[in-house]
């Protein structure tokens, strides 16, 4: 089974560009007024709409703290620096996409299963 999360957007071109250029997503499917982008194990769709949807948190997680630091230093250093969150045992920071959706970038400080296709 696959999953896609969809959001309405006021500026499809700007949102598509942001996710592709800064977060290395690929265009997975172009449906004209909807674009589905693929980032490793995440499919996220943005569709043209009158009202943008921004009340959410999209979390990206990485294998190392250094990868979190790299994305922070490259694109998001105007936000609060990454920190260790002891409650959830993660290393994280928050930012926003161009339409105000909250983005979380994190590394689990404990082992996790990195295999996505187990039956």
Image: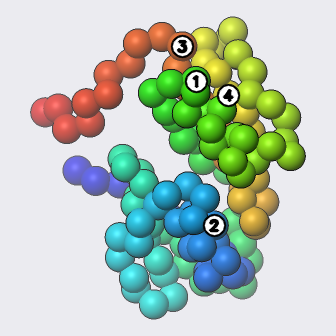
- Which residue is disc 3 drawn over? 109
Rendering coords of residue 29 (x, y %): 35, 76
Describe the element under mark 1 as helix, strand or loop: helix
Rendering coords of residue 117 (x, y %): 19, 38
Give the CA distance from mark 1 to mark 4: 9 Å
Rendering coords of residue 95 (x, y %): 76, 46
Dot 2: within a 10 Å radius of its alpha carbon, few (fewer than 14), some, or many (20 or more) residues? some
Give the CA distance from mark 4 to mark 3: 10 Å
Dot 4: within a 10 Å radius of its alpha carbon, few (fewer than 14), some, or many (20 or more) residues? many
Give the CA distance from mark 1 to mark 2: 23 Å
Is 56 situated left or right of 61 in this image?
right
Label whose residue precedes the other's in the sequence (3 or 1):
1
- Which residue is disc 1 drawn over? 65
Is residue 10 visible in this depiction of the protein? Answer: yes
Compared with residue 31, is residue 87 higher up or lower down, i.e. above or below?
above
Q: Which mark is residue 92?
A: 4
Q: Quadrant of residue 100?
A: bottom right
């Amino acid at each position: 089974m696959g999953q896609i999360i969809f959001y309405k957007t006021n500026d499809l071109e700007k949102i598509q560009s942001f996710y592709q250029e800064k977060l290395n997503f690929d265009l997975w499917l172009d449906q004209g007024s909807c674009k589905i982008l693929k980032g490793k194990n995440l499919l996220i769709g943005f569709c043209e709409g009158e009202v943008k949807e921004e009340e959410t948190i999209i979390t990206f997680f990485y294998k190392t703290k250094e990868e979190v630091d790299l994305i922070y230093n490259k694109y998001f250093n105007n936000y609060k620096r990454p920190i260790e969150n002891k409650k959830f045992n993660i290393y994280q920071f928050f930012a926003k996409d161009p339409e105000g959706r909250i983005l979380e970038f994190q590394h689990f400080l404990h082992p996790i299963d990195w295999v996505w296709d187990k039956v």
